[in-house]
Image (cartoon, helix red, strand yellow):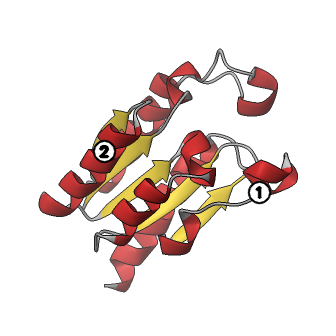
Amino acid sequence: MKLLIMNGPNLNRLGKREPGIYGAETLEDVEGKLHKLALQHGVELSFFQSNWEGALIDKIHEAEDCGLDGIIFNPGAFTHYSIALRDAVASITVPVIEIHISNVHSREPFRQTSVIAPVCMGQISGFGTDGYELAFQAFLLKRKEV
């Protein structure tokens, strides 16, 4: 199985940005934990982070063209307004799980709506950086069902 872990704007600032909300772990810490998990399960992972909407769209299209099995995607602030990212996810057959570190549903009203979630396989929100591992586990469960 081949998965892409994709992160949107400001996630390169994990560990520095509002640690009371997003925690002290860096994106590199998260990637390291996922890499170890992938080794245990024979899963090939790639990682991508960008603050640019177009780069994320290109990566989504590339995931389809390269035959990836799934995408774990934290779109950051793009979650709430990027119709372009929503359309990119809708345009591919690769399953996508949207994740958020904080519980977006208990935060400011503008954060409570995702334009991307309706075209995703599911959404995980509010479990800190463990949400990435939960999404990884969800793909493992799907693999067993096939």
Please report the residue visible at 69 percent of the width from the left and 42 percent of the height from the top: 128
User: How far from the left and from the top, in percent, is residue 39?
Assistant: 31, 44
Are dots 1 and 2 in contact, CB under 8 Å? Answer: no
Q: Is residue 88 above or below residue 73?
A: below
Image-based side of 122 in relation to 142, left or right: right
Image-based side of 21 in relation to 136, left or right: right
Q: Quadrant of the C terminus?
A: bottom left
Image-based side of 28 in relation to 24, left or right: left
Q: Do we see residue 67 in this rendering?
A: no
Residue furthest to the top in view is: 16
In the rendered structure, find residue 112 and report the number of the disc placed on it. 1
Q: Mark 2 = which residue?
A: 39
Please state which amino acid type lies under the numbered disc 1: Gln
Please state which amino acid type lies under the numbered disc 2: Leu
User: How far from the left and from the top, in percent, is residue 99?
Assistant: 58, 53
In the rendered structure, find residue 22 and report the number of the disc placed on it. none
Q: Is residue 63 above or below residue 94?
A: above
